[in-house]
Amino acid sequence: MTDYSDGLLPKNDTSRKIIHIDMDAFYASVEMRDKPELKNKAVVIGHDPRKSNGHGVVSTANYVARSYGVHSAMPSIKAFRLVPAEKLVFLEPDYKKYYSVSAEVHKMMHEMTDRVQSIALDEAYLDVTQNKLGIKSAVQLAIDLQTRVRRELKLNCSFGVSYNRFLAKMGSEYSKPFGRTVILPSEAKEFLAAQKIGHFHGIGPKTEEKLAEMGITTGKGLQQMHVRDLIKEFNRMGYLMAEHANGIDLSRVIP
């Protein structure tokens, strides 16, 4: 592959072992675990628009609801219109319960390493390059954690394993639910080349639209751009995009 970095990109660091854990439809899954009668329902966590004069936003939704097109941050009234009434269940969020369950998951993480960076109640990065269990395989650690969460908490999570945070998060989102994705240094650029721009963490709709106008719709398109041209168009964000497209992310997991 042609190198368009012009020597501007930093030397990559592939020595670390990073896991990104992402709970699957967390709030909705906790409610379904505690209320078995919701198993085949489209569960939406958020204010019921029928009880709030049409107001409210979807906090999260289970995979049945998502199959109808419901997603986080969607107006609740739109979710109401997308799902058949007999399938749809709105539940008010119970944050006290979600905090409690999240604490249990994080306790399991900290039994592996103290280098845990929590991003939200339902996701976190773990640096397991050195870990408390003395296990060299980050993949084995991730599988053990995923299995334990399912066994002890009756919940599912997905994970991505790679040598940096950006790729680990890409991995956890690549295959859901109960996904397992490993991105090795030798595979990173090929993996990224095949991804749609909208899957790159940090690239929002407006930037995605501008890139599309430039003919860039995949990671391969970004890889084929000169770093200087990306910087010219997007300033610092352009430089970050160039780094990420080439599998580079030197940011650290900050406990």
Image: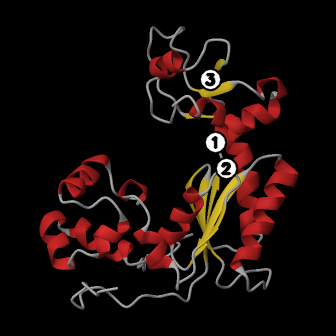
Q: Looking at the image, which is closer to me, 239 or 178? A: 178
The residue where tag 2 is placed is 177
Q: Residues within 10 Å of mark 3 (few under 14, many from 20)?
A: few
Q: Which numbered disc, 1 or 3, marks the residue closer to the eye?
A: 1
The amino acid beneath tag 1 is: Ala
Q: Is residue 96 left or right of residue 170?
A: right
Q: Quadrant of the C terminus?
A: bottom right
Q: Which numbered disc, 2 or 1, marks the residue closer to the eye?
A: 2
Q: Residue at x 62, y 23 (%)?
A: 92
The percent position of residue 10, horizontal first and vertical second, equals 33, 88
Distance Cα–Cα, label 1 vs label 3: 15 Å
Q: Does the CB distance between marks 2 and 1 fall below 8 Å?
A: yes
The amino acid beneath tag 2 is: Pro
Q: Does the CB distance between marks 3 and 2 fall below 8 Å?
A: no
Q: Does the CB distance between marks 1 and 3 fall below 8 Å?
A: no
Q: Is residue 157 left or right of residue 166?
A: right
The percent position of residue 98, horizontal first and vertical second, equals 68, 40
The residue where tag 1 is placed is 25
